Amino acid sequence: MQGVLSLDAYDLEGQTVLYRVDVNSPLNPVDKTLLDDSRLRTIKSTLELLSNSKVVILAHQSRPGKDDFSDMSQHSDRLSQIINRAITFIPDICSDSTISKIREMTNGDILFLDNMRIHDEEYGKKYANWQDTENSEIVSKLSSVADLYVTDAFAAAHRSSPTLTGFTNKLPCIPGNLMMAELSNLKIAIDDPPRPYLAILGGAKADDSLKVALNLIHRNVIDKIAFVGVVGNLMIWAKGYDIGARNKDFITNSLGNSFDKTWKIAQLLIDQHLDLLILPSDLAVEINEERVPMKLDELPTEYPIYDVGIQSLMDLRPIILNSKCILWNGPASFFERTGFAFGTIEILNMCIETDALTIIGGGHTSALVSSRGVSDKVTHNSTGGGSTMCLLSGEKMPVIESLISSALKFSND
């Protein structure tokens, strides 16, 4: 990506590197053990580049008040197993003792600091803008013992906090391998995709999906947009089908204050861009815990719509197979529920069957790809959720702005 610093430009040997990552992972609700280490695995390649540096890892797990808020000790242990190197866990953020330990590091050492969000400056304090995050104890202390700041925290790139954006003018801030892969592949999806280009947008976050659709249309890069999942239900409702009070209430309640704005975007898409849209032609509802097919002309329904129907998938198949680029974000169904994973799994099967450039847009979709062991069969499986949607929507992202600003300051050096 142009406009940012590159690790290739630096002699990393002997340098003390603050390495910010996002390894926020699902934990077992009973014993709080790690259920998935895929995000830890994604930072392995950057750590290999830093093998002769002194690396201080900064990370977080969930947020205060949540059941999965925990220290980073097991993340540190698991990462040590993944990279087959010793890692020392420090149950602290930036005390004088921790700063002394950083000063005492030798080449090849790795320290994994505790959950950054136990510090009030990192989570709990409001900042007017990302630039204000520089004025913090965390940044002041950690920058005093570091030479470089490297970030692979793409999944948090839409947020501002001291450890995400506060080092901009203190240290050269450089994207790691994961961050560069995310930015490069997702920029293809919004700037220069091979054509024909198909976006499949689903899941429950209809407001985010419709912003992405609008951005792709305004950029004039998209050929077809298929809506599935809850956002698909919203779109057929906007087209004039009565999806039933239960399903309408679910959408209205989930969107909250953003419903009116989202509804206007849905109607705009229907009114002005219907030729680009692919909407479900049939559905599947749950009746007495069973999957029951339903045609659109059988609506309204009192039952919850949990999947697209078989005809919708048959209609989508040739479009997927004829596309040169596919962006997929958001499941087509309530796939965690028995009997309703069908639509989502079929779309995944079609995406890995095609030779198209395939970009999986993070969140639940990315987790599904990882859990089914087919990450190597797609071009890019994003680690982001909200950050991916922000980038695809064309919204400004504090961490990206920070990287660009840091490059302007330190590029001459």
Image (cartoon, rainbow, N blue to C red):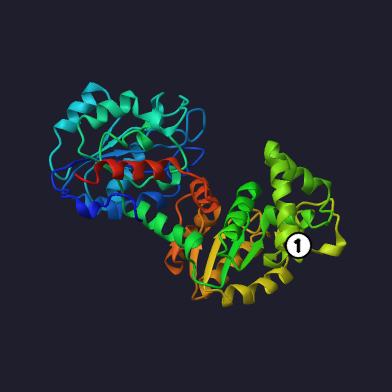
Quadrant in the picture for the N terminus: bottom left
**Residue 187: horizontal and vertical position, in percent?**
45, 58
> What kind of element bears circle 1?
strand
Residue 340: image quadrant is bottom right
**Residue 192: horizontal and vertical position, in percent?**
47, 65
Q: In this view, does 240 lie to the left or right of 116?
A: right
**Residue 404: horizontal and vertical position, in percent?**
35, 45
- Residue at 30% over, 53% down: 44
Q: Can residue 306 be seen in this view?
A: no
Q: Nearer the viewer, residue 169 or 361?
A: 169
Q: In this view, does 67 lie to the left or right of 293?
A: left
Q: Using the image, determine if residue 387 lies above or below residue 105.
A: below
Q: Using the image, determine if residue 372 lies above or below residue 91.
A: below
Quadrant in the picture for the C terminus: top left
Q: In this view, does 364 lie to the left or right of 112?
A: right
The amino acid pointed to by label 1 is Leu
Q: Which of 250 and 2 is in front in this view?
A: 2
Question: Which residue is tagged 1?
Answer: 283
- Residue at 76% over, 62% down: 283
Q: In this view, does 62 lie to the left or right of 205?
A: left
Q: Using the image, determine if residue 75 lies above or below residue 284.
A: above
